[in-house]
Amino acid sequence: MNGQEISRATTADAGTRPRALAPSWRRLRALARAELTLFGRNRGAVLTALLMPLVLPFTVRPATEQIDLKGIGLSIGTMTLTAAIGFAFLFAVYSSLVGAFVSRREELVLKRLRTGELDDLEILTGTALPAVCLGLAQALLVATACAVLLDAGAPRAPYLTLLGLLSGLVLSAALAALTSAVTRTTESAQVTAVPLVLVSMMGSGIAVPLDILPDRIAAACAFLPLSPAVRLVRAGWTGELSGYEALGTVLTALAWTAVAVFAVRRWFRWEPRR
C-alpha cells in the first residue's frame, strides 16, 4: 500500500460525504486502519515494537539485583514493570513513529492527506494511533504479568499510573513527530531516534532508578522529558509520592507535553526534505 492508496482509503471513508456527516472519529479510523496495515508489513518495525519492551527489562534485571531495592522502596516486580512500560514508550511508540512520520512525509502521503478532509491534528493523530494503542496494550499486559508473576501486587495509587501512562504515550508520539522534522530519510530515522532513547533509558528511571544516582544528577534527570511519566507510573505502584510531589510531577509532565505539541505545530515538516 503506497501513499496514493492511503489517501484513497481515507477519502473513501471520509472525503466522499459532507464534513458534517463524516465525524472526526471515522476519518481517524480510516487513517489508523491504513497505518496499521503499513505497520504490519514492516517486519523490522513490528519486531522492534513488540519484542524490545518485553525483552529489554529482563536484560537489565541482573544489574538491578545488585541494587538494594528494598532500601529505596522498590522490588524486582515494580522495577521490571516500570522498565517495561518505559521501553514501550521508547520503542513501541517513539522509535516506530519517527520512522513512520518520515516515511509518510518522503512518500508525499502527508502532503496528499492535507488536501482532503483531514485537518493537521487528525493526520498526526491517525498516523500515531496504531503505535500508541500498541504501547498501551503492552503496558497493560506487562502490568498484569508483573503483578501476577513477580509479586508486584496491585497499584496503591492507580490514578497516578494511569496519568503517567497517558502522558508518556502522548509525549512519546509528540517527540517522535518533532524528531522526524530533523530526520532527512527513513534510513536515518534509526540514528536520529537513538539520542533520546539512550538518554531516557539511563536518565529517566527506566533502566536505572534515579534514587541511586547522586543527588545533583538525579535532580537534573528528573526534568528529562519522560522522567515525570516514568515516575508517575512507578509511584502508582509504590505510593511513594506525597500529594504535593505528585502534583509537581503531573505539572512537569503536562508542561513537557505542551512544549512538545507547540514545537510540533511550529516545526513539523509536511513535505520532503530535498
Image (tube, rainbow, N blue to C red):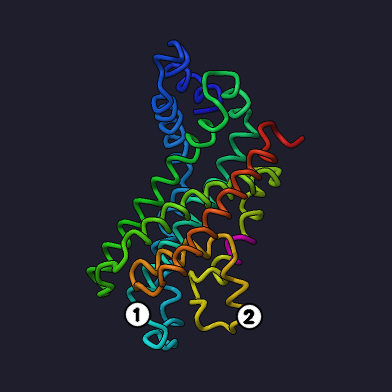
In the depicted structure, whether residue 168 falls above or below residue 210? above
Figure quadrant of the C terminus: top right
In the depicted structure, whether residue 11 falls above or below residue 80? above
In the depicted structure, whether residue 239 falls above or below residue 127? below
**Residue 19 located within the stretch drawn in magenta:** no
Q: Which residues are magenta?
A: 195-199
Q: Amino acid at mark 1?
A: Ser
In the depicted structure, whether residue 256 falls above or below residue 236? above
Q: Amino acid at mark 2?
A: Arg
Mark 1, secondary structure of its residue: loop
Residues packed near mark 2 inside 10 Å, few (<14), some (14 to 19) or many (20 plus): few
**Relative to the observer, which residue lies in front, 48 or 230?**
230
Q: Main secondary structure of the magenta part?
A: helix
Disc 1 to disc 2, C-alpha distance: 24 Å
Disc assigned to residue 41? none
| Disc 1 to disc 2: CB gap under 8 Å | no
Residues packed near mark 1 inside 10 Å, few (<14), some (14 to 19) or many (20 plus): many
Disc assigned to residue 216? 2
User: Which of disc 2 and disc 1 is earlier in sequence?
Assistant: 1
Of labels 1 and 2, the one closer to you: 2
Residue depicted at 59% across the width and 71% down the height: 221
Residue depicted at 40% across the width and 64% down the height: 233
Q: How many marks do you count on the picture?
A: 2
Q: In the displayed structure, does residue 152 sit left or right of residue 208? A: left
Mark 2, secondary structure of its residue: helix
**Relative to the observer, which residue lies in front, 264 or 57?**
264
Q: Disc 1 designates what residue?
A: 75
**Relative to the observer, which residue lies in front, 72 or 133?**
72
